Image (cartoon, rainbow, N blue to C red):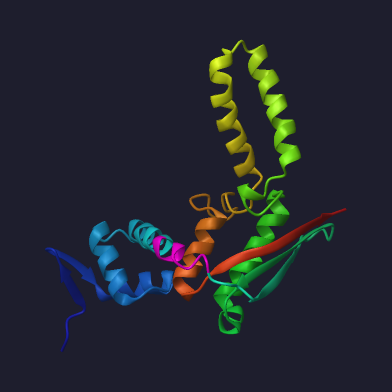
Amino acid sequence: MPSNNLNFKNMTITAQMVKELREETGVSMMQCKNALTESGGDQEKAKEILRKKGIAKAEGRSGRDTEEGYVATYIHTTGKLGAIVALSCETDFVARNEDFRALANEIAMQVAAMNPKYVSPDDADSEDLEKEKGIFAEQLKKEGKPEQIIEKILEGKLKKFKEEGSLLKQKSIKNSEVTIEDMIKEMIAKMGENITIAGFHRMEL
């Protein structure tokens, strides 16, 4: 009878540990075993290891066309706040996947709760950036910052401004350890195809 224990590098990783990690992450048994071995049997650290590896794989799929997808909506219990999100993928097979749709629904809830201005920092409006740059520059001058370092400080402040307004860079309202971008990359690794946010809209009375 085969043993329930899997020994790696003088450590014992049980089949139940591997099974639980696989159910939570959706990745292969071997990847789960390797991650658990690397993390010393710590489930949370193993999930972080898998997440990082998943992100690396996801980057190789970023150029693929996403012509299928799912439109998710969220309406707050008050009935006065709602959001709609279009999450795109490559195939109808993934578009019908429950995990993919659950992610779209979660992103719609994120939009309603956090009111992002755009999908990516690269989408930031140039007029908004110029306006904020002027405000930041005036503040720095009043603080007596030397002219030679103001531009460098402005660069950092504008980067932060763009990221705070970006849906992809926001921390998940359900798990502050990950961003929406992280969640999408995890799903890309799990589904094996490119996934993007095609657009979103938030409404409030």
Foreground residue among 114 and 182: 182
Tell me the quarter of the picture where residue 84 sits.
bottom right
Query: In the figure, is residue 42 to the left or right of 183?
Result: left
| Image location of residue 54, percent across then percent down | 41, 64
Q: Above or below — where is 198 with respect to 131?
A: below
Q: Which residues are magenta?
A: 56-63
Q: Above or below — where is 159 with respect to 69?
A: above
| Image location of residue 58, percent across then percent down | 45, 65
Query: In the figure, is residue 159 to the left or right of 9?
Result: right
Q: Residue at x 63, y 52 (%)?
A: 167
Q: Residue at x 30, y 58 (%)?
A: 42
Q: Residue at x 66, y 56 (%)?
A: 110
Q: Can see residue 17?
A: no
Q: Can see residue 82?
A: yes
| Image location of residue 37, percent across then percent down | 23, 63
Tell me the quarter of the picture where residue 198 sits.
bottom right
User: Residue most toward the right?
Assistant: 205
Q: How many marks?
A: 0
User: Residue most toward the bottom?
Assistant: 1
Q: Tell whether position 76 is magenta.
A: no
